[in-house]
Amino acid sequence: MTDIAIPESFEFLFEDAPYKVMYGGRGSAKSHSIARALLVQGAMERHRILSCREFQNSISESVHKLFADLIDEYDLHDFYEIQKTTIVGRNGTEFLFAGLRHNVSKIKSFEGCTRVWVEEAQAVSKGSWDVLIPTVMRTAKSEIWVSMNPDLDTDDSYKRFILNPPEGALVRKINWNDNPFFPEGLRREMLSLREKNYDEWLHIWEGNTRHTLEGAIYANEMRQATEEQRIARVAYDQSAPVFTAWDLGWSDMTSIWFWQKIGFDIRVVDFYQNRMEALDHYISVIQRKPYRYERHFLPHDANQGQLSAGGKTIAAQLRQRGIPLSVLPQLPIAAGISAARNLFPRVWFDEQACADGLDCLRRYRYDVDQQTGQFSRKPLHDDASHGADAFRMLAVAINDPKPREERKKPIRPAFIGSNAGWMGAL
């Protein structure tokens, strides 16, 4: 019998509970301990084990190698067979690996999993949790294991599992000082950061959340919206039309905000984003929603990009289907950010329907200049960019709710001679 060393702080993983939540800072051995516990449980009893994260484009981005290394370390090859994308046990236990975002159909195929380890859960969106949890939590044996180094206290995973954990959940904060194998090299690094930047040390090593990300572009605006309780339940008003604002992508996100203009207020009632989907997918999404649309606002590249369109531009495809739209002019990014900042005090967000979009706005930040190490004036291009870019489109569209060509022509005098008829041109 092979003894596999697991720190005492992870002993609760062998108790019965529907959710097991581990959070804290760097150096706590969360990933290694969870992987060891799953290897042990998979050997003791047949399990279908899914290891997943928000984004995984290939098996190399998963913890497949971590499991393989532990199988090598403890010489478990007589029991576990390491395959290219899976690991299987002699008793029928199976380890699977997947990304959550934009993979709904595949997630639904994991219904029979009895153990689901969601790693780096601080990055998992509300939309992904809303699909994963009801898919896998269908039997008494099903468990979801959550591991995270908390980031923002507004993150869905932090609120869902730490601030308001599900009934029966076992929640443990585990840090470097709970790790009996904590290496001396990491200890020196940890102590050095504590001396240089205590607040950063609290976040990285003690697992405390940040209130805002460094360099966050809309930090003040989001803080004000929170303090003024403009991130709340915002109901769709059936008497008013809905507008949308888009940012387009293929391998990157296509993001869409849905809003209504009620008096002076802008009520943002919904948000959607996805990637690697053709235009038909997004048309279907907006048509399934119960809204009465007036106009859809697209960025300038809608007259250029094709979004898997067989040669037709996105704007042309939408117009061909009778969908009312405006293509907004290209503005400097700084001008769009300024427009968004000016708009923020008027905006109310639906907290639930817009959760993933709000996450984009909180995480939208300036890039770091590689030469100076200081924040540049250029936003960082990452997964938060597209939702934030679509919000810039919303801010620009607010000032131009109808396309120029559909505005009524102004009435002006037309002076005519004595021989002309009564019908002058207006």
Image (cartoon, grey):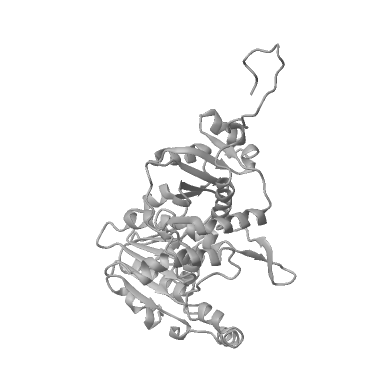
Residue occupying image coordinates x 52% and y 40%: 296
Relative to 178, is 303 on the left or the right? right
Residue 112 visible: no
Q: Is residue 358 visible?
A: yes
Residue 291: give x, y in percent of width and height. Answer: 40, 41
| For residue 167, side relative to residue 279 (left or right) | left
- Picture mark count: 0
Horizontal and vertical percent position of residue 381: 62, 58
**Image quarter (top left, top right, bottom left or bottom right) of the N terminus:** bottom left
Residue 159, image quadrant:
bottom left
**Residue drawn 37% across the image and 71% down it:** 163
Residue 252 versus residue 99: which sits nearer the camera? 252
Name, please, the residue furthest toward the front.
Answer: 418
In the image, taking residue 137 as reference, residue 187 lies left or right, namely right
Task: Measuring from the top left, give residue 314's x and y in whole percent.
Answer: 58, 36
Residue 367 lies, with reference to residue 252, above or below; the image says below
**Image quadrant containing the C terminus:** top right
